[in-house]
Amino acid sequence: MGYDTGKTVQYDEIQFELMMQLGDYVQQGIPLYFDNVPSTPLEVVNNLSVRENEVYMADFVRDDRGHLTQIRYDHVS
């Protein structure tokens, strides 16, 4: 998953908050996906930043008992 470019990335408050929220979900064992690829919170935020002219929707997937099982970011066309 991803690689280190050696560059320092500056995040705004909204991006940082999203990364922290997604990190909380991951710590609870809830996997993240970006375009069907397993992703880290950092990868999700970076992908959303690079694709800022495209629309992605967060889908909070729940099981039949209403428990959150995964979070998916899918391209909306």
Image (cartoon, rainbow, N blue to C red):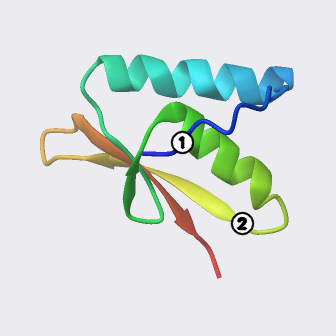
Marker disc for residue 51 = none
Residue 58, relative to residue 32: is it above or below? below
Residue 25 lies in quadrant? top left
Rendered residue at 59%/70% (across/down): 75
Residue farthest along the left direction in this orientation: 65
Pointer 1: residues within 10 angstroms few (<14), some, or many (20+)?
few
Residue 20 relative to residue 24: left or right: right
Quadrant location of the C terminus in the rendered image? bottom right
Q: Position of residue 21 (x, y in %)?
A: 54, 21
Residue type marked 1:
Tyr
Instruction: Name the N-terminal-most of marks 2 and 1.
Output: 1
- Helix, strand or loop at label 1? It is loop
Residue 66, relative to residue 13: is it above or below? below
The residue that disc 2 covers is 55
Quadrant location of the N terminus in the rendered image? top left
The one nearer the camera, 59 or 28, is 28
Rendered residue at 82%/58% (across/down): 52
Marker disc for residue 3 = 1
Residue type marked 2:
Val
Mark 2 → mark 1, Cα distance in angstroms: 24 Å
Q: Position of residue 10 (x, y in %)?
A: 85, 26
Residue 3, relative to residue 37: is it above or below? above
- Helix, strand or loop at label 2? It is loop
Rendered residue at 31%/39% (across/down): 31
* Comparing labels 2 and 1, the label whose residue is closer to the camera: 1
